[in-house]
Amino acid sequence: MSLEYIRKAYNVPAKRGGRVEYTGDGSPKLGTISGARGAHVRIRLDGEKRLGLYHPTWGLRYLDSADLGVGG
């Protein structure tokens, strides 16, 4: 499956290079989407060496430029 499938099936804006906030373990962590594996999003959390697999709607908040303090 692909990020395109995940976007359509889960109605989320998942895209390679997109930033997310993961809150599934109780403390918010920022990360970057690197791809998909099956129906899961592959994310490298900031400061981590390894990629993790995350469900597209569980504990993830997809950030846009306004959330990141970028833009006009």
Image (spheres, grey):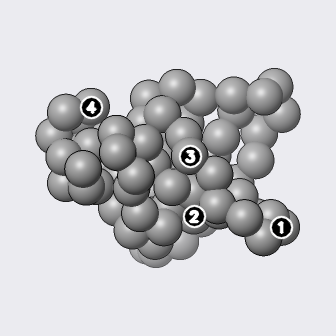
Q: Which residue position is annotated with label 1?
A: 47
In this rendered view, identify the residue nearer to me: 37 or 60. 37
Helix, strand or loop under label 3: strand
Q: Amino acid at mark 2?
A: Thr
**Image x and y of residue 48, in percent:** 80, 64
Find the distance from the CA under tag 3 to the CA under tag 1. 16 Å
The crowd level at tag 4 (other Cα within 10 Å; few <14, some 14-19, many 20+) is few
In this rendered view, identify the residue nearer to me: 72 or 32. 32
The crowd level at tag 1 (other Cα within 10 Å; few <14, some 14-19, many 20+) is few
Q: Which residue position is annotated with label 4?
A: 10
Q: In screen coordinates, is 20 left or right of 1?
A: right
Picture quadrant of residue 32: bottom right
Mark earlier in primary sequence (1, 4)? 4
Picture quadrant of residue 6: top left
Q: In screen coordinates, is 41 left or right of 6?
A: right
The crowd level at tag 2 (other Cα within 10 Å; few <14, some 14-19, many 20+) is many
Q: Amino acid at mark 1?
A: Gly
Q: Which residue position is annotated with label 2?
A: 32
Q: Which residue position is annotated with label 3?
A: 53
**Image x and y of residue 54, in percent:** 54, 40
**Image x and y of residue 44, in percent:** 65, 62
The crowd level at tag 3 (other Cα within 10 Å; few <14, some 14-19, many 20+) is some
In this rendered view, identify the residue nearer to me: 45 or 21. 45
In this rendered view, identify the residue nearer to me: 20 or 37. 37
Q: Amino acid at mark 3?
A: Leu
Residues at marks 3 and 1 touching, judged by CB atoms closer than 8 Å:
no
Q: Amino acid at mark 4?
A: Tyr
Helix, strand or loop under label 4: helix
Mark earlier in primary sequence (2, 1)? 2
Mark earlier in primary sequence (3, 4)? 4
